[in-house]
Amino acid sequence: MFKAYEIKPGIWWVGALEWNERYIHGFSMPHGSTNNAYLIMDEAVTLIDTCSEDHASELMERIADVVDPAQIAYVVSNHSEKDHAGSLREVLARAPEAKVVTSARGRDILATYLGDERELIPVKTGDELSIGSRTLQFVQTPMVHWPDNMVTYAPQDRLLFSNDAFGQFLATSERFDDEVDAGLLFQSAKKYYANIVMPYSRQTAKALASVGELDLDMIAPSHGLIWRSRIPEIMERYRAWSALEPTDSAVVVYASMYGSTARMAEAITEGFMAQGVSVRTFDLHVSDISDIMTHVMDARYVAVGSPTHNMTVLPEAGAFLAYLKGLSPKGRIGIAFGSTGWAEAGPREIASVLEQAGYTLPLNPQMTKWNDRPEDGDGIFMAISALVERVRSEG
C-alpha cells in the first residue's frame, strides 16, 4: 500500500506521514508532520535515517516498494532522537548485514538502543563513504539540536540530507517546497526554528558556514518538505534567524483571573503602539505557547503577566515561563507585570524567571493591588512609552 517516491534518479523518499500528530515536546503541529527517510539505490544500497517506532511498518513498506530491505548495506543515522532512529531496530532486523554509520556521539546513544550486537561505524567531518557511483560526505553539526547531529552530502547529486536543519512540521501529499503555498511553508519553517533550533543559534550559524560552501541543488530535511526551488531564501532566513537580531517589536503574554492583569496587558500593548512598536498580545488561556515563541524570536521586548495565585503564578503562566526559559534568546528586554493581593509573589517570580532566561529588566515589576483603577493603566502606559523612548535614545 505505501509507496516510495523518487526525488532524484536513484534516490527515493521512503518516510512516514504523520497526518494526525498535533503535539511534540509541547510544540503544536496543526498541520501534522513527517518523518523523512531516504533510500539511495547504488552498488551499496543506503538508507538515510529511519523514523519513529510507531511508523516502522510504513517505512518498511515504502522501502520494499523499491528493494528488498535485506539488500540494505548501510544505514546512515544523522541523529539519534527517536523520531529519526526509533525504527532502527526494525530496519536492522530486516537488513541483517547492514552497517550503521553515525557520529561518535551518535554511536554512544544508538548503543543504548541496539546493544553491542551491531556494528556502529563512527564518522566525523571530512570522512567519506563510497557506496558505488556515489561518495557520501559527512559534516558534524553538533547541537543542531543534539550533540550527535551531523548531515550527509551526496556531491554527485548535489543533495544535502540535512536532518533537523531546514525542517518544518508539515504533512502534505506533496514532497517539494515549490508544490505548496510559500507563506505556509516559511511560517512553518520559522515556527520550527523558534521552537526547536533557536537555543542553539550560535551552533547553527557555524553549521551554516560549513554547509553554505556546498554546491546544493536540493536539501532533504528529516521533517517537512524538500527544498529545491527556494534554497537561497531558506538559507538566508536561517542566517537571519541564527543571528537572533531583534526587530523593533514586542510580545505581551498574560494569564488573568478576574480581568485586572488583562487590563494591564492592554495598557502595556497601547504603550507600545503609541510609540510605533509592532506588538502582538496573547492570552495564555487561549493561545498556544509554541505559536507565541515564533513572535518572541523577533521581539526586542517581552512582557509577561500573571496575578499571584497560591503564592506563585497561574498554571498557564508557569508553563509558558518554563517553556520560555528553555528557548528564549538572550539580551532582550523583559517586563514583568500582574495584579496582586496580600502578596506580590506572581509578578516577582516572573521577573526572576525572565532574569534567569537572560533578559534585562529596566523596570520594576508592574503591579496593581486587588482591583486595578484607571490611573493604574495610565501609569503603566506611561512607563512603557518612556521605556521605549529611553531604549531608542540609547541606541
Image: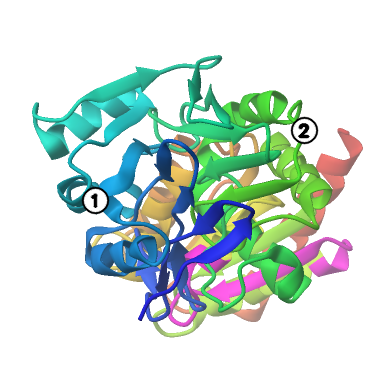
Which residue appears at 24% of the width and 50% of the height? 91
Can see residue 339? Answer: no
Residue 8 quadrant: bottom right
Q: Is residue 249 left or right of residue 68?
A: right
Residue 260 lies in the magenta-colored region: no
Q: Nearer the viewer, residue 77 or 210?
A: 77
Tell me: residue 53, above or below residue 240: below
Q: Nearer the viewer, residue 326 or 280?
A: 326
Sort mark 2 into few (<14), some (14-19) or many (20+) by Cα contacts within 10 Å.
some
Identify which amino acid the numbered label 1 is placed on.
Val
Q: Nearer the viewer, residue 137 or 199?
A: 137
Residue 352 percent location from the top left of the image: 42, 42
Residue 165 quadrant: top right
Image quarter of the C terminus: top right
The residue range painted magenta reads: 273-291
Which residue appears at 24% of the width and 47% of the height? 88
- Ranked by sequence position, the earlier of labels 2 and 1 is 1
* Badge number at residue 252: none
Residue 15 percent location from the top left of the image: 42, 62
Q: Are marks 2 and 1 in contact (CB under 8 Å)?
A: no
Tell me: residue 288, above or below residue 152: below
**Residue assigned mark 2:** 215
Please, what secondary structure does the residue beneath circle 1 have?
Answer: helix
* Badge number at residue 91: 1
Tell me: residue 81, above or below residue 177: above
Sort mark 1 into few (<14), some (14-19) or many (20+) by Cα contacts within 10 Å.
many
Can see residue 113? Answer: yes
Image quarter of the N terminus: bottom left
Residue 289 percent location from the top left of the image: 47, 66
Please, what secondary structure does the residue beneath circle 2 have?
Answer: loop
